[in-house]
Image (spheres, rainbow, N blue to C red):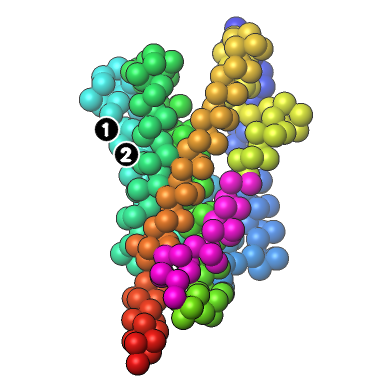
Amino acid sequence: MGVLAAAALLPVNTTLGVVLAVLLVAAVGVAALARLADFRERGYHRAIALAGIRAAVQLAAVSALIGWVVREVPLLLCFLFLMFAVAVRTAGRRITDNRTWWWAAVPIAAGVAPVVAVLLLTGLVPLKGVALVPITGILIGGGLTATVLGGRRALDELRTRHGEVEAGMALGLPDRDARLLVARPAASEALVPGLDQTRTVGLVTLPGAFVGMLLGGASPLLAGAVQLFVLVALLAVQAVAVAVVLELVARGRLHRADGGGRARRRSRTLRGAEGE
């Protein structure tokens, strides 16, 4: 019944492929015409095209492998680790181009690991791929998004308002505290998408978990309960991820170029001047 409902909603045929291609070309065209680019003036049209193609290839591969992976616990754990590793690499490289990108593993793990552990220990989610993979994937994706948004916004703010950071250091604030005063409000905005999604669920959108449960034949009550659980778990993951990535930025562990080194040299210079 659920398979028939899913097929009726979105049949997998040539028409679907053509529509997807048209939508991707439209997205690339709009980004190119509007000259949408990052702060380095690198256009997003190419990134959109590559993201669409990668998504198609990756989903095709996962669709072919998922049935095999979920049967064995060792393979399942390897697959979950692969998901985590890709998320860390993606988040880290979105935040910085230097070797500190690997610190992105800390906020994602800090947010996701405790939630998954609680779910397994309480028995709410069994150690089976059919349940653990989608739940963990959703949580890792939420941690990735929060880490990227929090880290990027914190570092952008520190770059724009570096004078305020130096002024705080000159007044005697520790490096960490001076950076936190500037970066905390900006990084905290990374929680807004998750908050808005939770506030408007059922009124503006029906998220994927809810729709998927319904298509799978579950009752509306069960589908609503699962979706509520996912949203609340995401809020917990994202809050932890933002808090941890903010702390890493404030301590200079995660930075851009040699920004961390410059900040430390400025701090030593300021303290030396005070000593004189």
Q: Amino acid at mark 1?
A: Cys
Q: Is mark 2 in CB contact (under 8 Å) with mark 1?
A: yes
Q: Residue at x 44, y 33 (%)?
A: 137
Position of 215 compared to 150: left or right? Answer: right
Q: Residue lying farthest left?
A: 74
Q: Which residue is tagged 1?
A: 78
Q: Quadrant of residue 182?
A: bottom right
Return the x and y of residue 109 as percentages of the image width and height. Answer: 36, 41
Is 142 located above or below residue 156 in the figure?
above
Task: Say if the magenta span includes residue 73.
Answer: no
**In the rendered image of this protein, does residue 235 appear above or below residue 91?**
above
Which range of residues does the magenta coloring cover? 172-192
Q: Which residue has dot 2 on it?
A: 82
What is the x, y in percent for residue 196? 68, 40
Q: Looking at the image, which residue is at 39% across and 28% down?
A: 116
Q: Is residue 118 visible?
A: yes
Instruction: Name the residue nearer the viewer: 201 or 22.
Output: 201
Q: Secondary structure at mark 2?
A: helix
- Give the residue drawn at x 40%, y 44%: 108
Q: Position of residue 72 (x, y in %)?
A: 26, 19
Say if the magenta span includes residue 186.
Answer: yes
Q: In the rendered image, which quarter contains the C terminus?
A: bottom left
Q: Which mark is residue 171?
A: none
